[in-house]
Amino acid sequence: MHGSSGVVSNTDPWVRHFNSMGISTLVIDGFSGRGLTVVGPNQGLLVRLNLIVDIYRSLEILAKHPRVDPDRIVLMGFSRGGQAALYASLDRFNKLWNKSGIQFAGYIPFYPGCSTSYVGDTEVAPRPIRIFHGTPDDYNPVASCKAFVARLQDAKHDVALTEYPDSQHAFDLGLLGISSNVVSANAQTARNCRIKEGDGGVLLNADTKAPFTYKDTCIELNPHVGGNPATAEAARKAVSEFLLALFKTG
């Protein structure tokens, strides 16, 4: 599941690598069918939970595919898609929207945003969750993910966060040889927001107690993105080992 820029260049090296391992892939496009290309400068163009619905519908298609083992489908997502991959593990959302009759075998969110607290968000599927993030990420700071992981671990779930130093948001662009660190011009970030679900499913700004919008004063612009070839390769190795153990093909 892609991030705020849609299906972009960081997807291809992952697809090629997984295919070389004998693992098939499905890339979900949650934008084109809605007439969208990017949402970074206006995150309000698409409610984030829409991507979770897209994920479950894709799972339903895959579960019926004659060449796919429905018990060995893993969900991976990046940034906004990483957030969707993380919260797609919630029991509550599975009961609401997952019509496939199966569950993902595992979840692999890359640099997700974890600043939103949903009701019942520590009740997740009994499947491993492996999060990969960068220490200096100023788009989706790792601190909020560390706090969420701690709550999930306290609830005895199989979740782990791997944190890489010197790795900005989208650090896996390093798989393409990219090592630059640039400003994502005019992109909105909720890095200083605390968002909490209130009555009736309304998302509230936890500081103002008012319904959250992308016009709130906590929203900032111009976070950084940048690849790191070394940590990108380390993450690819870690993901590969996780999948081999999970699929028991190693």
Image (cartoon, grey):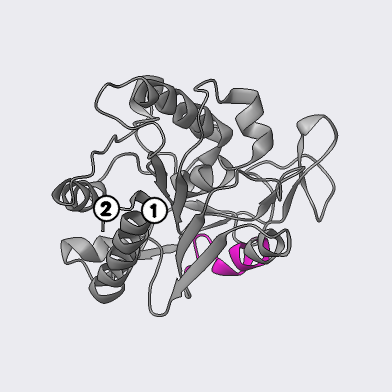
Q: In this view, does 169 lie above or below 125?
A: below
Q: How far apart are marks 1 and 2 (CA)?
A: 8 Å
Q: In which quarter of the image is residue 219?
A: bottom right
Q: Nearer the viewer, residue 131 or 225?
A: 131
Q: Which of 113 and 71 is in front in this view?
A: 71
Residue 248 magenta: no
Residue stretch rendered in magenta on the structure = 137-148
Would you call the spot at circle 1 few (<14 residues within 10 Å), some (14-19), or many (20 or more)? Answer: some
At 38% from the left edge and 79% from the top edge, which residue is drawn? 166
Amino acid at the residue labelled 2: Thr
Horizontal and vertical percent position of residue 80: 48, 46
At 47% from the left edge and 49% from the top edge, which residue is drawn? 107
Residue 178's mark? none
Q: Which of 233 and 154 is in front in this view?
A: 154
Would you call the spot at circle 2 few (<14 residues within 10 Å), some (14-19), or many (20 or more)? Answer: few
Q: In this view, does 159 lie to the left or right of 234?
A: right
Q: Quadrant of residue 240?
A: bottom left
Q: In this view, does 95 lie to the left or right of 62?
A: right
At 42% from the left edge and 80% from the top edge, which residue is drawn? 165
Residue 140 magenta: yes
At 40% from the left edge and 47% from the top edge, which residue is drawn? 76
Element type at mark 2: loop
Q: Is residue 109 left or right of residue 190?
A: left
Residue 246's mark? 1
Horizontal and vertical percent position of residue 125: 60, 43
Amino acid at the residue labelled 1: Leu
Residue 249's mark? 2
Horizontal and vertical percent position of residue 147: 67, 66
Quadrant in which the C terminus is drawn: bottom left
Horizontal and vertical percent position of residue 177: 16, 66
Circle 1/circle 2 CB separation < 8 Å = no
Q: In this view, does 4 lie above or below 65?
A: below
